[in-house]
């Protein structure tokens, strides 16, 4: 399985933008890039996903590099509620095993008031 | 609408006893997953059900672990002869086909 690399931790101030990076240099052409986050004492929560083009939804934006070897999750205005562990995950939905989510260590985001 | 629910929320059991953990997925979701998260560890895939297909059991750590999904809806994860290393939060998720997964709140299992 293609792997992802994320910083262990990042800090941001409330109401400022946050850019969470993810490297996936061995990504294959059929791998989708998914982001989930896990708030304290809760199950993971889907954030966003994309294949090649940049994506926007109500929670965040996903910027994907042209060569797809890296991506960035963008929170436009961080709130205290955004403090969580953010996971960048590759899923090859063409494979049966691609239906599972393989979680790495993720990035612990701290938001300062 | 109702999300994924799991019961019990907390379970304390003695080493060697059997436990059953229940998951009620979102109505209409064809796929159901079990994961576990040990203290300070990442999430680990256990088993995956998709429709009427044979489940993907490749993540089950030992033959003490088993799971069923009855009627394509509710699932039960059973751990026989529990060991202390089984202590973890057990998370269930469901999805429509291979789309985004919706997770339940988890069951915290403590084996004493």
Image (cartoon, helix red, strand yellow):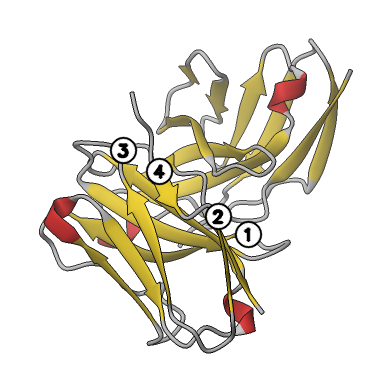
Marks 4 and 3 share the same chain: yes
- The CA span between labels 1 and 4 is 21 Å
Residue designated by label 2: A103
Up-down relation of residue B41 to residue A68 (above or below):
below
Q: Chain of mark 3?
A: B
Label drawn at residue B5: 4
Label drawn at residue B42: 1
Marks 1 and 3 share the same chain: yes
Q: Decide if residue A99 is in sight here.
A: no
Q: Are marks 2 and 1 in contact (CB under 8 Å)?
A: yes
Q: Chain of mark 2?
A: A
SS assignment at label 3: loop
Residue B65 spot, x, y in % from top left: 39, 79
- The CA span between labels 4 and 3 is 19 Å
Q: Residues within 10 Å of mark 2 (few under 14, many from 20)?
A: some
Residue A14 spot, x, y in % from top left: 82, 15
Q: Chain of mark 1?
A: B
SS assignment at label 4: strand
Task: Answer with the quarter of the image where residue A107 lies.
Answer: top right
- The CA span between labels 2 and 4 is 21 Å
Marks 2 and 4 share the same chain: no
Point out the frontmost of discs 2 and 1.
1
Q: Are marks 1 and 4 in contact (CB under 8 Å)?
A: no
Q: Looking at the image, which residue is at 47% across and 60% down? A: B35
Marks 2 and 1 share the same chain: no
Task: Say whether residue A78 is left or right of residue B23.
Answer: right
- The CA span between labels 2 and 1 is 6 Å
- N-terminal of the two: label 4 or label 3? 4
SS assignment at label 2: loop
Q: Chain of mark 4?
A: B
């Amino acid at each position: 399985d293609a792997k992802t690399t994320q910083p262990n931790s990042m800090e941001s101030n409330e109401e400022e933008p946050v850019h969470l990076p993810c490297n996936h240099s061995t990504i294959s052409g059929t791998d989708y890039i998914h982001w989930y986050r896990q708030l304290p004492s809760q199950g993971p929560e889907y954030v966003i996903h994309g294949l090649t083009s940049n994506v926007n939804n109500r929670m965040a934006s996903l910027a994907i590099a042209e060569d797809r070897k890296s991506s960035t999750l963008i929170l436009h205005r961080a709130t205290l509620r955004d403090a969580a562990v953010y996971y960048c995950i590759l899923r090859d939905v063409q494979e049966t095993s691609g239906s599972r989510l393989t979680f790495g260590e993720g990035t612990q985001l701290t938001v300062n008031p | 609408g109702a999300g994924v629910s799991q019961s019990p929320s907390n379970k304390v059991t003695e080493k060697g006893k059997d436990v059953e953990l229940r998951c009620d997925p979102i109505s209409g979701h064809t796929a159901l997953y079990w994961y576990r998260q040990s203290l300070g560890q990442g999430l680990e895939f256990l088993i995956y059900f998709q429709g009427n297909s044979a489940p993907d059991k490749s993540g089950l750590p030992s033959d003490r672990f088993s799971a069923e999904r009855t009627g394509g809806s509710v699932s039960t994860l059973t751990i026989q002869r529990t060991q202390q290393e089984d202590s973890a939060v057990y998370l269930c998720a469901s999805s429509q086909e291979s789309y985004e997964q919706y997770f339940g709140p988890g069951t915290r299992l403590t084996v004493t």
